[in-house]
Amino acid sequence: DGNTFIRANKPGETQTVYTFESESEDLLVVSNSEELWERGVPGGNQLDFAFSGMQAYATNLDGDYSNNTKSFLYSPCFDLTSIVNPILKFNMAFVIELDWDLLYMQYSTDLGQNWNVLGSADDPNWYNSSRFSGDGVNDDCYNCIGAQWTGTNLNLTEYAYDLTGLGTNDNIIFRFVLHTDQYVTEEGALVDDFVIDGTTLSTNDENLIKFVVYPNPSSNIFNIRLNNTTRYNIYVRDITTKLLFKDSNENSNYKLDLSGFSKGIYLLEIESNNMHITKKILLK
């Protein structure tokens, strides 16, 4: 009819549990055919429960998923730079046709332009299958990507993934991907209590100290620019908060050289007049 519809995602809050009990917790859903993923009271023959409250997200609240479908359930956009040791957690149960249909998670750090599979079957408390298309095990798994949930787990189980390696991203999105073949349907998956957990970084009166770091990630030099020129201290700590470097400066610009440090995530802290703010930086 000539109309154009634009679906927009929204920012999310870390350390906030999404229980999916209200419309304010609606998530973005996109499918290549029939739209799956519904928020509400589960009423399937097997998936008829929620972890907390009465509602959850399910591929179909009271029936089976569709054949030949790829359907996406998107998380809000999260800023991971304000927390340490971020962990993605959710509770899930599923009934998915074994090795023919599958569910997995992806993430994007560039506003959805590119997507990567989150984790592998070797990660603890994560995927239950490492099969991939053409692996020669059986004549099935044509949609398998080497990291997925498939089969049945009717126990509402907490799954968790360590996001420390992605902790320098200030705009990251996650999505569940359900991929089905052309035959046989099941009830699918049920997801509840989604959260990005972690420990909040210290930000005493953040409005009085503002600084930017660029480039981040960097292979050696990080440029720091502050909004004031009062004397301030610079601390670099490892992810366990152990102090590795300290310096002082009075200029609004500072060049931090970490060329002698090992690759990884570090905590950069600026302190001035008994106020401080911490950001994560990635040395690659």
Image (spheres, rainbow, N blue to C red):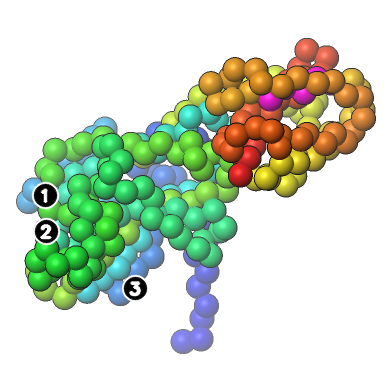
Q: Where residue 97 sits in the image (x, y, percent)?
A: 12, 60
In the image, is residue 203 above or below residue 92?
Answer: above
Whole-percent x, y for residue 204 in the image? 70, 19
| Front position among marks 2 and 3 | 2
Magenta residues: mostly which secondary structure?
strand
Classify 194 as above or below 190: above
Q: Position of residue 130 (x, y in %)?
A: 23, 53
Give the extent of the magenta segment: 232-236
* Along the line of sight, the residue nearer the viewer: 50 or 280: 280
Residue picked out by circle 1 = 152
Amino acid type of disc 3? Answer: Asn
Find residue 32 and name its label. Answer: 3
| Residue at 57 percent of width and 36 percent of height | 264
Decide which of tag 3 and tag 1 comes sooner along the chain.
Answer: 3
- The local secondary structure at tag 3 comes to loop
The quadrant of the picture occupied by the C terminus is: top right
